[in-house]
């Protein structure tokens, strides 16, 4: 496993507030990497900087050695780093298949002139095949023609990942994927992530709930108050005194 | 093949249509044909979720460009029409730089300001735009014959056929775009620009693309108008016409391709034919305004929602419904 | 030259007065109802025609006619609120279209009642305050300036010092929270519409003897008002007043020293620049619309 995605001295300031303070960690290729921390630790801000949603105040995000920080979200996506959104952010007015088709935008880039003349049949069928493949992968093929607004919550979460998966990403960034899921849904979602990993996709999960991702991650980075706190395997992190302190302290802080 | 037969019947009806009309009604028919293209191109712009108030001025850009190209440079008329569309699209690309910093209400107002500035520039600069009086004596489309039919472009019927063919072709292109992956991406940009971006869509580029295409076709419609009436001036492209376009689109409904066209045809027929026939000359805007209010109150999803109810079988598969507001 | 500058300055103050009356009404309606009232220029026009009908037609005393005009246009506002904006409150674009429909109706009524041509109104007073040979302020214009100062001060007091005003501002900021506080949204909407329309009406009534009254006079008024509320920041009453003064100064000076069309171009460009620099307006927040 080589260093694949690297966060280096990443800093984000909002006015006088330093949300993330020179954070550094490395994500190995093909691994499932967790980024955890108590509320307000700056996880989501970090996530948004990696995905190109925010431009970092200082520091770098390196993908295969290339600095991608400060690029726009679609430029980051085109380099193979695709994110999902915390709440079921989907095209609610479109069908499930159409949502997945939007996900195939990168591998099958639409061309307007070809589309008018009708010379894009191969691309269209390729995109549809890929979209269906992604939906099958996430067990959504039976609801393909339904409108997303009519889907159950669990299905919407799965579709969010299917849209990301449809674009053949190298890295999927997941923003709190287990929030609001019951244990059964959580278990299924974990299975899907294992399968994504088996597919060679690197996964970075941002999660508040430490227990949820213990069994899943290869490596976990823990941060607190915007700073790097600890890193290691699940067992290591679970027993790390600083992590325990941060979570207990964080809990006290929040309460 | 019943569907094929329906299309043949529609085509036959459209060809026969002008022969049952009076001269002034034939003229209205020509304007209606041009306006159908105008409003259909406007719909393409609204696909990305932006409502512009500059569309009619952009139409005017096409009209002025085509008129000036023929008058000053002697460009052959049909070619100049195409170039008028190209110029309109280019101007739209230029306008997109300031305008696409804005969204929603601010885009609406910003586009209005940009459009008015262009219109006032025509008004102020007599050379080459002719000032407030505009450009007169624009070359008409040269007559020609296709064997069985002799086109005489001083006849509205001839121009109706000519414009009809061009408009039909443009509508076909617009329809192809909407049904293509590009059209799907426009929808995506409208409904969740963040998610679209995360899927690798360059949102700004797609907004600009929709704006440029819509403007290009608006420009062609303007050129069609200019070479028919032979004279254009800044007031022909003012906010009044823009308001009509807006109401055609909203009263017709913007969830389907045919909605705005339906709105345009129904409201124009109502306004120009029915109300005129009833002899309500001065009261026409009053009745028209009342109809607008009633339709927005009682048909919030537009005239197309009636059609969708009538053809429910197909409606289940057709484009999704939505409210036009953000 | 100094005289010309002073005279142009006076003209600008007059223009700022009626522009701010119209713009403040528009902002108030937008703030409370979240809808762009395209018919606002026609409310101005309706106020002017009230003078045509009452003062020029029936010889009603001018100020009585103005008061009746204010009430009449205020009631038009109430009508719009009840018939258009309340049913369409979840559909801002629908509200916009409905207000365009209302605009056409008002215009048609004016044409049917008074003809398309502009109407001559006998002057209210010929008196002129002469500061020097060349710097003169007609008293009729002074009325407009005084009315603007008095009404806008009264409005300011009403909004900041009374319970109604508090309710109005609360529901402009957050309708749901305001409703939880026991504020009747319908009630505040009615008040806002009445005041907003009434201000446009009185501006139209007072300026009627000074301008050419015709059914399409609302057009340039609404364009000006839009520029002003954008430059001032949508939703900000103070911003609208400041922007009215700034716009009136720029527009009047450019008109005097160059020409009117160029002044319009400059005004619109000003607005475009504001939108480009700060795409959500100078003071305004983008959460409505």
Image: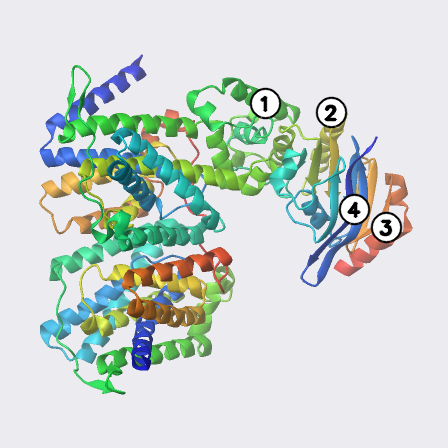
Q: Which residue is mark 3?
A: A243
Residue for point 46% across, 72% down:
C166
Residue for point 32% across, 32% down:
B82
Give coordinates of residue A130: x percent, y percent. Answer: 60, 22
Question: Contact (CB < 8 A) between labels 1 and 3?
Answer: no
Give coordinates of residue C158: x percent, y percent. Answer: 41, 77
Q: Earlier in the sequence, mark 4 or mark 2?
A: 4
Q: Is A42 left or right of B241, judged from the image as shown?
A: right
Q: Disc 4: which chain? A: A
Q: Nearer the viewer, mark 2 or mark 1?
A: 2
Secondary structure of the residue carrying numbered label 4? strand
Secondary structure of the residue carrying numbered label 1? helix
Give coordinates of residue B71: x percent, y percent. Answer: 24, 38
Q: Earlier in the sequence, mark 1 or mark 3?
A: 1
Residue at far top of view: B1
Q: Disc 1: which chain? A: A
B197 and A37: which is toward the camera: B197
Secondary structure of the residue carrying numbered label 2? loop
Circle on res. A8: 4
Q: Nearer the viewer, mark 3 or mark 2?
A: 2
Mark 4 to mark 2: distance in Å?
27 Å
Q: Quadrant of residue B228?
A: top left
Mark 3 to mark 4: distance in Å?
21 Å
Report the number of discs: 4
Circle on res. A132: 1
Give coordinates of residue B207: x percent, y percent. Answer: 47, 40
- On whether disc 3 and disc 2 are found on a single subunit, the reply is yes
């Amino acid at each position: 496993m080589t260093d694949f995605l690297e966060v280096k001295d990443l800093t984000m300031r909002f006015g006088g507030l330093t949300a993330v303070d020179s954070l550094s960690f490395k994500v190995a290729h093909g691994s499932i990497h967790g980024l955890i921390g108590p509320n307000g630790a700056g996880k989501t801000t970090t996530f948004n900087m990696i995905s190109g949603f925010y431009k970092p105040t200082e520091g770098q995000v390196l993908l295969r050695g290339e600095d991608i920080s400060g690029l726009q979200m679609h430029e980051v996506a085109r380099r193979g780093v695709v994110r999902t959104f915390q709440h079921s952010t989907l095209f609610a007015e479109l069908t499930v298949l159409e949502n997945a088709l939007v996900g195939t935008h990168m591998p099958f880039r639409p061309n307007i002139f070809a589309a008018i003349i009708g010379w894009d049949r191969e691309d269209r069928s390729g995109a549809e095949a890929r979209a269906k493949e992604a939906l099958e992968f996430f067990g959504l093929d039976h609801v393909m023609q339904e409108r997303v607004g009519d889907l159950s919550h669990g299905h919407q979460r799965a579709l969010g990942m299917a849209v990301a998966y449809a674009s053949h990403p190298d890295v999927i960034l997941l923003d709190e994927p287990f929030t609001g899921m019951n244990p059964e849904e959580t278990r299924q979602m974990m299975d899907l992530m294992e399968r994504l990993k088996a597919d060679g996709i690197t996964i970075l999960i941002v999660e508040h709930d430490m227990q949820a991702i213990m069994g899943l991650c290869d490596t976990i980075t823990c941060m607190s108050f915007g700073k790097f706190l600890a890193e290691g395997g699940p067992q290591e992190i679970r027993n790390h005194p600083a992590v325990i302190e941060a979570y207990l302290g964080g809990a006290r802080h929040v309460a | 093949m019943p569907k094929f037969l329906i299309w043949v019947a529609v085509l036959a009806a459209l060809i026969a249509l002008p022969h049952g009309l009076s001269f002034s009604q034939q003229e209205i028919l020509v304007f209606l044909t041009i306006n159908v293209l105008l409003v259909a191109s406007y719909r393409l712009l609204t696909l990305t979720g932006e409502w512009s108030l500059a569309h009619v001025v952009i139409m005017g850009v096409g009209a002025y460009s085509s008129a000036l190209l023929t008058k000053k440079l002697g460009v052959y008329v049909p070619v100049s029409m195409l170039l008028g569309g190209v110029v309109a699209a280019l101007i739209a690309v230029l306008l997109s730089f300031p305008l696409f910093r804005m969204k929603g209400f601010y885009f609406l107002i910003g586009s209005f300001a940009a459009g008015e500035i262009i219109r006032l520039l025509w008004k102020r600069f007599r050379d080459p735009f002719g000032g407030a009086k505009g450009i007169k004596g624009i070359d008409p489309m040269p007559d020609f014959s296709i064997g069985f039919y002799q086109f005489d472009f001083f006849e509205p019927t001839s121009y109706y056929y000519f414009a009809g063919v061009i408009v039909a072709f443009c509508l076909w292109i617009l329809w192809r775009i909407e049904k293509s992956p590009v059209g799907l991406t426009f929808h995506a940009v409208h409904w969740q620009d963040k998610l679209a971006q995360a899927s690798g869509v360059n949102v700004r580029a797609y907004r600009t693309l929709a704006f440029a295409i819509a403007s290009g076709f608006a420009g062609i419609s303007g050129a069609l108008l200019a070479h028919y009436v032979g004279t254009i001036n800044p007031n022909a492209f003012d906010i009044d016409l823009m308001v009509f376009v807006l109401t055609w689109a909203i009263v017709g409904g913007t969830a389907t391709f045919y909605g705005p066209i339906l709105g345009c045809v129904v409201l124009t027929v109502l306004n120009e034919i029915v109300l005129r026939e009833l002899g309500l000359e001065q009261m026409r805007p009053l009745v028209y305004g009342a109809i607008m209010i009633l339709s927005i109150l009682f048909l919030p999803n537009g005239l197309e929602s009636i059609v969708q109810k009538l053809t429910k079988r197909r409606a289940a598969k057709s484009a999704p419904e939505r409210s036009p507001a953000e | 030259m100094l005289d010309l500058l002073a005279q142009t300055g006076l003209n600008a103050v007059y223009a700022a007065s009626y522009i701010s009356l119209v713009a403040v009404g528009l902002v108030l309606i937008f703030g409370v109802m979240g809808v762009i009232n395209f018919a606002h220029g026609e409310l101005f026009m309706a106020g002017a025609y009230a003078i045509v009908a009452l003062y020029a037609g029936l010889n009603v005393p001018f100020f009585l006619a103005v008061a009746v005009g204010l009430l009449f246009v205020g009631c038009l506002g109430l009508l719009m609120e009840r018939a258009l904006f309340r049913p369409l409150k979840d559909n801002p674009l629908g509200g916009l279209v409905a207000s365009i429909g209302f605009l056409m109706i008002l215009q048609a009524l004016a044409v049917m009642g008074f003809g398309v041509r502009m109407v001559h109104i006998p002057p209210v007073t010929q008196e002129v305050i002469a500061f020097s040979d060349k710097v003169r302020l007609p008293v009729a214009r002074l009325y407009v300036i005084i009315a603007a100062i008095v009404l806008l001060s009264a409005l300011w007091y009403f909004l900041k010092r009374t319970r109604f005003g508090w309710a109005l501002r609360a529901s402009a900021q957050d309708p749901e929270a305001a409703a939880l506080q026991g504020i009747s949204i319908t009630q505040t909407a009615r008040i806002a519409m009445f005041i907003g329309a009434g201000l446009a009406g009185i501006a139209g009534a007072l300026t009627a003897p000074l301008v050419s009254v015709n059914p399409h006079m609302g057009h340039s008024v609404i364009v000006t008002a839009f520029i002003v509320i954008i430059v001032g920041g949508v939703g900000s009453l103070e911003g609208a007043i400041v922007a009215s003064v700034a716009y009136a100064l720029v527009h009047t000076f450019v008109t005097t020293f160059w020409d009117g069309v160029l002044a319009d171009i400059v005004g619109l460009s000003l607005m475009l620049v504001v939108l480009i620099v700060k795409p959500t307006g100078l003071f305004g927040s983008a959460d409505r619309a």
